[in-house]
Image (spheres, rainbow, N blue to C red):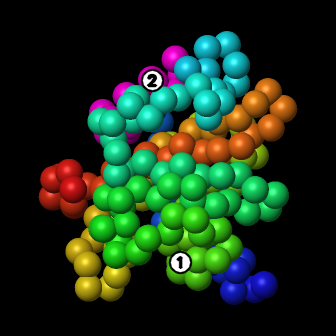
Amino acid sequence: MLADVRARVQAARMMREATLDELPGWLRDMHALWDAKRGARPYPARPDFVFEEFMPWLGRLHLVEVLDGDFRFAVFGSWTAELIKREYTGLKLSEIQEPLARIWEAGYRDVVARRAPVFVHHPKSRYNPRDPEVSWWRAILPMGTEDRLTHLLVGFQVIALDGRYL
């Protein structure tokens, strides 16, 4: 229990909330699609989207199921899986025993609590100790019905510290 609390505190130190205007362009575009789909509702439902609408961003998107007290990767983006050399499709966050999962979880729990989008910037991070430090951005967008949040749509962009988009 104490180790879990420490992991969550460390995760919070490694990120800061960002604004929509700070996000890389394609994450803003993804938010614009999400916003158009929701209309006057707090958030759109998963069936409001068709697969083809996500084509420009495939590989960099995660579809996360919101469970009772946990989250499951319905789809873990292939680009991200290749970058971190891990595939998490089908796994619950509670089953992933890596520090990065606690960072993801902090953002997901924030969206569930607010029932609104959250944008996050991780100024300096590395997945593996041998990897170079990078900066990364996430747009975490809720989806569901009027009375129940069911999914999170997560866009992910990594930027090298020299400014190159990866």
Q: Which residue is mark 2?
A: 32
Q: Reply above or below: 101 against 145.
A: below
Report the front residue among 2 and 52: 52
Tag 1 secondary structure: helix
Q: State the image coordinates of residue 139 (x, y, percent, origin top left).
A: 48, 43
Instruction: Choose top left, top right, bottom left or bottom right for residue 44.
Output: top right
Distance, label 2 to label 1, CA atoms, is 31 Å
Residue 121, image x, y percentages:
43, 52
Closer to the camera in the image, 33 or 88: 88
- Left or right of 115? Residue 7 is left
Q: Nearer the viewer, mark 2 or mark 1?
A: 2
For the point 80% across and 38% down, which residue is it? 148
Q: Mainly helix, strand or loop, the magenta region?
A: helix
Q: Which residues are magenta?
A: 22-36
Whether residue 29 appears in magenta in the rendering, the answer is yes
Of callouts 2 and 1, which one flags the residue occurring earlier in the amino acid sequence? 2
User: Is label 2 in contact with label 1 (beta carbons under 8 Å)?
Assistant: no
